[in-house]
Image (tube, helix red, strand yellow):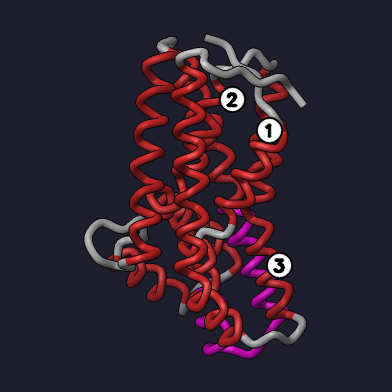
C-alpha cells in the first residue's frame, strides 16, 4: 500500500498537536520557576530557548526512528489499521476529558515526572536545560504523541523520497514548538505568566476536545487509506 502525503493534513495535525496542554503546561512551569528564583528575563529567554530546542531535536529524532521502524516492518495495511484504531481510542480519551476532566484514564504527564521537573527546574542551567528538554520530550510522548504517530505512520507508507520525509518532519516539529516560542516571547516582552496560565486553564477542555476530534479523524483516515477506500495526491 502506498499513499501520498498532503501539506494541509501535515500542517493541521501539527497545529493541533502544538496546542496540547501537556507541552504548554510544562513550559509555563519552567518559566514560572525561573522567574520565581530570579527576575532575569535574559536568562529565562536563553534557558527557555535551549529547552525548546532540545524538545524539537528529540521529537525530530523520535520521528526518524519511527519512520525507519515502520518502514522496516513492511506490514503497511495491518499497521495502518492498528495505528488508526489506537489513535481513535486516544481521541476518545481526549474528548472524555472535555466532559469529565481527570476522571478515569487521561493523557497527561505522570505526577511523579511533574515533581521531577519541578525539582530540576529550580536549579536549571543553560546546559541542564538541554537534559531537561530531552527528558520532558520523552515523558510527554504518551500525552502528545498521538497526532505524531499518525502522521509518521502516514509518511512512512508514502512513496516520497527520504529527504522529503525528513523535510515534513522538520516542518511538523517546527509548528509543534511554535506556541512554546510564542509563549516564551510573550513573557519576555512583559506578559505575565499568570495570565498565560489562566488562559491555558480556561481553554484546556476545549483544547482537548479539538485534539480529540482531529485524532479520531486521523485514525479514520488511516483505516480508510489501509483499505484503499480513499487516496490523496501530493499538494
Q: Where 55 falls versus 37 (above or below)?
A: above
Distance between the alpha carbons at the discs numbered 1 and 2: 8 Å
Q: Main secondary structure of the magenta part?
A: helix
For the residues labelled 3 and 2, say whether their Cβ atoms are less than 8 Å apart: no
Secondary structure of residue under mark 2: helix
**Foreground: 232 or 110?**
232
Secondary structure of residue under mark 3: helix
Residue bearing mark 3: 182
Residue sitting at 69 percent across and 16 percent down?
Answer: 161
**Foreground: 44 or 84?**
84
Distance between the alpha carbons at the discs numbered 3 and 1: 22 Å
Residue bearing mark 2: 155
Which mark is drawn over residue 210? none
- How many C-alpha atoms fall within 10 Å of the one at disc 1: few (<14), some, or many (≥20)? many
Residue sitting at 59 percent across and 89 percent down?
Answer: 38
Which mark is drawn over residue 168? 1
Task: Write down the region rendered in magenta.
Answer: 30-55
Residue 137 included in the magenta stretch of the image:
no
Percent x, y of residue 132: 48, 61
Amino acid at each position: 500500500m502506498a499513499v501520498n502525503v498532503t501539506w494541509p493534513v501535515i500542517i493541521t495535525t501539527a497545529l493541533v498537536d502544538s496546542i496540547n496542554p501537556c507541552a504548554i503546561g510544562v513550559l509555563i512551569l519552567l518559566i514560572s520557576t525561573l522567574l520565581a528564583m530570579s527576575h532575569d528575563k535574559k536568562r529565562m529567554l536563553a534557558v527557555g530557548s535551549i529547552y525548546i530546542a532540545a524538545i524539537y531535536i528529540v521529537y525530530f529524532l523520535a520521528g526518524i526512528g519511527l519512520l525507519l521502524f515502520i518502514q522496516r516492518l513492511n506490514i503497511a495495511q495491518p499497521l495502518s489499521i492498528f495505528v488508526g484504531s489506537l489513535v481513535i481510542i486516544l481521541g476518545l480519551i481526549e474528548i472524555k476529558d472535555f466532559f469529565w476532566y481527570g476522571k478515569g484514564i487521561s493523557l497527561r504527564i505522570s505526577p511523579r515526572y511533574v515533581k521531577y521537573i519541578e525539582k530540576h527546574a529550580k536549579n536549571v542551567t543553560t546546559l541542564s536545560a538541554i537534559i531537561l528538554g530531552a527528558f520532558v520530550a520523552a515523558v510527554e510522548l504518551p500525552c502528545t504523541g498521538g497526532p505524531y504517530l499518525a502522521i509518521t505512520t502516514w509518511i512512512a507508507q508514502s512513496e516520497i523520497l527520504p529527504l522529503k520525509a525528513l523535510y515534513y518532519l522538520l516542518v511538523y516539529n517546527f509548528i509543534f514548538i511554535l506556541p512554546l516560542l510564542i509563549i516564551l516571547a510573550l513573557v519576555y516582552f512583559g506578559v505575565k505568566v499568570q495570565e498565560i496560565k489562566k488562559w491555558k486553564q480556561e481553554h484546556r477542555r476545549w483544547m482537548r476536545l479539538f485534539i480529540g476530534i482531529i485524532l479520531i479523524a486521523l485514525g479514520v483516515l488511516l483505516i480508510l487509506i489501509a483499505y484503499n477506500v480513499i487516496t490523496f495526491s501530493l499538494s
